Amino acid sequence: MEFKEIYRTIENGIRKVYDSDRYQDYLKTMARFHNYSTNNCLLIFSQCPDATLVAGYQKWRMQFHRYVRKGEKGIRILAPMRNVVEEGEEVFTGEPMFKYISVFDISQTEGEPLPTYIDATLEGKVKDYDQFLQQLELISPVPVKFSSNTGNASGYYRSGEEVIYLKQGMSELHTIKTLLHEMAHALLHNRELGGMQMSRSQKEVEAESVAYIICQHFGLDTSEYSFPYLAGYSSSSELPELRESINRIHTASKTLIRQLESLRNPDTILRSPPDIREQIVDEILGAERHRKEISFEQIKNIGGLTYGSET
């Protein structure tokens, strides 16, 4: 499938999400959550870094029919105080006054589920999964580690540490898709390329688009997850983030697909020693920088070795 055709597929898929009843129900629910100030967002993050949806005890109970679990510790934030009352009359003090109140993240509650516009994970097997995963790890711009401590995230790229963490125990399809997403972050949004200056929405649209395109190229359908994900990070149905990044998405997708295609023979690459693998990757990346094609025969002969069934 040509890139322009894939791009149109992404656009149409996102617009269908915007028009769906499921997404409209989600938007109505999210509108009932308070938008906290920058200072309160910092307070929430410092106490509960994995917080996603936050509300007060009574709000959870009255509006969302959810209940804070016994023993959960509240997240302390600042709330404006009402005017001071003196001798039965309200008196404006002239200065804003605040007090600490407690709020709770959705992970601290239980009860009726909130509407969502995206399924939590992709389910499905991937042909030659172990080999495909090894190939991705081989060409990844940074090391890849599996962890049981990724919080609510399926994975993340840590720019300061220059490493990708993936949640253990995900389905094969969701693992491959997530790794490609985080590899795109590492390729496009590292500090050297000014990734810290880009908005989160822009970065997420780029990374998920790259992941979708590469999965599509190798016959893996992630549309049921990728399209809602992209809709969630697009500011409008006109998709300005996607349109602005089309060239970057195309270049990153093409680069990673070329590198993967060069490693499609598992007997040749994956059985080679680590030092030979590094030589192979250096050769591929060097060819990519100089916009040259590298043949499979060239890869096989790196280090003067032969592979597979050859002796």
Image: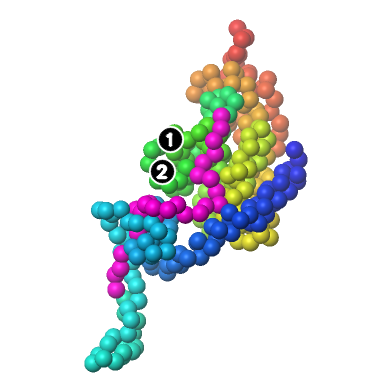
Residue 81: x and y in percent read 32, 78
Q: Residue at x 40, y 37 (%)?
A: 147
Q: Nearer the viewer, residue 134 or 232?
A: 232
Pick the quarter of the image with the N terminus.
top right
Which numbered marker is on residue 168?
1
Q: Residue at x 39, y 53 (%)?
A: 111
Q: Residue at x 54, y 57 (%)?
A: 26
Q: Is residue 308 above or below residue 117?
A: above
Q: Which residues are magenta?
A: 99-125
Q: Is residue 8 left or right of residue 225?
A: right
Q: Is residue 161 magenta?
A: no
Q: Residue at x 71, y 34 (%)?
A: 292
Q: Residues within 10 Å of mark 2 (few under 14, many from 20)?
A: some
> What is the basis of the colouring in this image?
rainbow
Local secondary structure at mark 1: loop
**What residue does disc 2 label?**
150
Which amino acid lies under the numbered mark 2 shown in the image of this protein?
A: Thr
Residue 38: x and y in percent read 42, 67
